[in-house]
Image (cartoon, grey):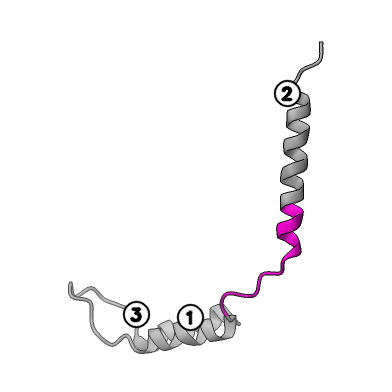
Amino acid sequence: MTDRRDSADARLRDLLGAWRREIDEVPVPPLVDPVRAVDVVIEARRSRVHAPPDGARTRPRDQGLRDAQNDIL
């Protein structure tokens, strides 16, 4: 007995495979420049000067910057 789903499954595999190959052929440009992203994050960390409203202790101001630079390098 032949299962009719076999041909449907094969056609679906072929269709999805062709779709994937078509998508993979189109190059996707980088969405974010990594160097610029790091600069933005470091600048944002530098501009953080207000104490938290609940009075919780935070790291020294320069420590966050050093941590960010160590993560990058």
User: In the image, 48: left or right of 65?
Assistant: left
Q: Earlier in the sequence, mark 1 or mark 3?
A: 3
Q: State whether residue 47 is above or below residue 34.
A: below
Quickly name the residue at label 3.
59
Q: Position of residue 47 (x, y in %)?
A: 34, 89
Q: Residue at x 74, y 43 (%)?
A: 15
Q: Residue at x 41, y 84 (%)?
A: 63
Q: What is the span of residues highlighted in magenta in the rendered image? A: 20-32
Quickly name the residue at label 2.
5
Q: Position of residue 2 (x, y in %)?
A: 81, 15
Q: In 3D space, how far apart are the residues under numbered discs 2 and 1 (Cα atoms)? A: 57 Å
Foreground of the two, 44 or 24 = 24
Foreground of the two, 19 or 72 = 19
Element class at badge 1: helix
User: In the image, 55: left or right of 49?
Assistant: left
Circle 1: residue type: Asp
Quickly name the residue at label 1.
67
Q: In 3D space, how far apart are the residues under numbered discs 1 and 3 (Cα atoms)? A: 11 Å
Element class at badge 2: helix
Foreground of the two, 12 or 64 = 12
Q: Position of residue 51 (x, y in %)?
A: 23, 81
Q: Residue at x 42, y 82 (%)?
A: 64
